[in-house]
Image (tube, rainbow, N blue to C red):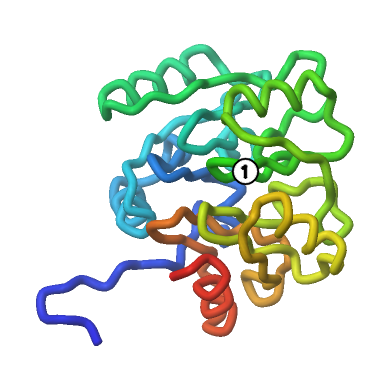
Amino acid sequence: MKRRGEQEITRLFSVDGSSYIGVFASCTESLVLLPSHISNTLATKMERALAVKAVRTSIAGSSLVGCLAVGNTNGFIFSPYALDSELRKIREFLRAQGLRAKLSRLPAGEKMTAAGNIILANDTVALVHPQVSEKTVDLVAKTLGVRVYKGTIGGLKTVGMAAVATNKGILAHKNATREELEFLEESFELPVEIGSVNLGVPLIGAALLANTKGYAVGYETTGAELGRIEDALGF
């Protein structure tokens, strides 16, 4: 029961009317990256839901921040088309908050440029699209400070959209195979559950932001789906 004077934390969100908030935003244990144009009110609610500070920015001139960026406590990886001014803004924010993190762009020769779509990561492990170059694998390992594996989830190579991983657990595409789930459990050394968001959509990463402190999810997500999120990620 909510105590007197305690405000309820909003968990259900939309960005530009879309419930696919993971396409527009990306979070870590330290911060959440949000599109430049969102309101102060929405930014504040996101900060409360995730218990971190927000940075409002574009990536490669686009509001699709969640598709084009991925990070953890140790660093961030961006589309190779991310602008110097965008990375400078993020560096300045990190410095102001007393945080240290590496910022890198995907290699210029990498065919797949949507970093948030092709990389699933927490603070110790990353799973990447099985066709990324070894140069990209090395970059992920060095920037994020993680062990890197290649694989699929639910048969999808865009693993960043197919699951969400925190330092407590993983929620994955509801059609993930037993072999994929076992590989995730062994690689990340965390419990893994399957689920959905936004009324049955299996693309978890497209609509869920989470860290060990809290989560935010698309407004169409049902009560049963919220329960699954909380069980899988330890809330």
Looking at the picture, tell me which residue is in the foreground, 39 or 157. Answer: 157
Identified at 78% across, 63% down, the residue is 181
Determine the residue positioned at 52% across, 45% down: 25
Q: Quadrant of residue 94?
A: top left
- In the image, residue 212 sits, relative to residue 31, either above or below, namely below
Quarter of the image with the C terminus is: bottom left
Provide the residue designation for mark 1: 121
Q: Residue furthest left?
A: 5
Q: x%, y% of residue 65?
A: 56, 37
Q: Residues within 10 Å of mark 1 (few under 14, many from 20)?
A: many
Where residue 19 sits in the image (x, y, percent)?
Answer: 57, 62
Please count the marks in the image. Answer: 1
Residue type indicated by callout 1: Ala
Q: On screen, 116 above or below 153? A: above
- Relative placement, left or right, of 46 versus 97 is right
- Above-or-below relation of 201 to 99: below
